[in-house]
Image (cartoon, rainbow, N blue to C red):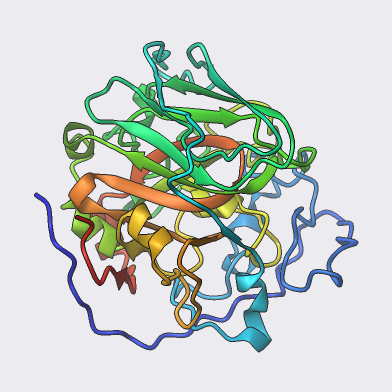
Amino acid sequence: MKHSPISLPLIAVTTLLSTSYAAPILPTVANPNAQLNAGIKTEADFDWNTTNLVNQNSNYFNDNSNFFDSDVRRKINYNASENAFLNAKKVTINRHDKGGKSRKQISDIKSAGARGYNEFGQAQSYSLGATDTVTGMGADTGNGNEKFEIFGGTTGSAMNVSMAFRTKSDAETYGNQTNPNSGNEHYTNDKLIGHSPLVGNVMRLHGMGIQDATADGRVKTNPFALVSTYTDADFEATFSLSELEELLNGCLFLGWLNTSLDGDSTTVTDGDRWVHAVQGNYDNMPDNPNRHDMYKAIGNPLAMSLEDYIDGTTTSIEGLSKASGEIRVGDHGGWADNNSVWAVIDHNSDFAVIPEPSTYALIGGIICLISVALRRRK
């Protein structure tokens, strides 16, 4: 069932971003750029090969101070003197400038079977020049109305961008998730998805990199907005509440597969995690990005279409704005009326739509302050 935008009373809640963190068990090497980029690190302050979720040092990731210092999530009131880095990266784009590009029609979607996380179908690609924009790239997967679309600025250099797809595996479907109320942690090392099944297919996006990969396997790109449109049938297969309720609870979003958490960023195992796509960002992120908890998105999800976000001035951070036509790295949201979720990101990766059944989230006491659209797209 679809819903029109609604107005919600604003709740003044302030979350302090932690610039300190619990030290891992093993000795670490200080980030040489820590003082030059206060509030931002592009690399973790530990060795992924020895400190990860599947060995004896996994307790490092069970401390919220490693990412935020509070369980009050997303509700940040922007203060330039405390968290100016959240406004560090914005890019002006023309969302209509597709340069003749059109979405690829994908027919080869690899069946992932039980746990085929690394198995993808034949990639489709775009060859871009240095003055081309990335807007217009995307894919229709042939699964009803499911599609992925990219909006962004110029590449700055020639690149070959590829997109490949797989189905969600049996282990990523409803019924295979952990129950956070069973006394266990959100995740176990034999369940990749924790307690959040995927909605539809998985897209692997490669080739947009502008820097070498960092130690955790991420590759930085120029900022771009990625929107994924899913089908009602795939969403209903997760047995969640309505899309609007999921959005309001911060439980429906574009997900990123963090492949480093098992200590090996080159492959995907059950020790890795599906988390919020903005966690993979290099810019507009807090110190010490261990990026293991799916909820740790910075700021409020915006209940609006990506087009309305780009054309408007609202950001995911209370008290921070942008110009019309800009995108700010880290903004994210969704729109139930067209079955879409989106995020502004700056990294290559595997992406999919993730709902967490809200019954879990509500029992856990997760409260989300959400910004809403002032108008509907015609």
Quarter residue 249 falls in: bottom left
In-front residue for pair 282/54: 282
Residue 168 shows in this picture: yes
In this rendering, would 160 be left or right of 7?
right
In-front residue for pair 378/148: 378
Q: Position of residue 61 (x, y in %)?
A: 62, 55
Counting the numbered discs, the total is: 0
Quarter residue 371 falls in: bottom left
Residue 178 shows in this picture: no
Q: Position of residue 285 (x, y in %)?
A: 63, 63
In this rendering, would 27 be left or right of 104?
right
**Residue depicted at x 65% and y 49%:** 58
Quarter residue 89 falls in: bottom right
Q: Position of residue 123 (x, y in %)?
A: 53, 16
**Residue depicted at x 75% and y 61%:** 41
**Residue depicted at x 17% and y 38%:** 236
Vertical order, 288 against 223 (above or below): below
In this rendering, would 86 be left or right of 15?
right
Q: Quadrant of the C terminus?
A: bottom left
In-front residue for pair 190/75: 75
Q: Position of residue 72 (x, y in %)?
A: 44, 75
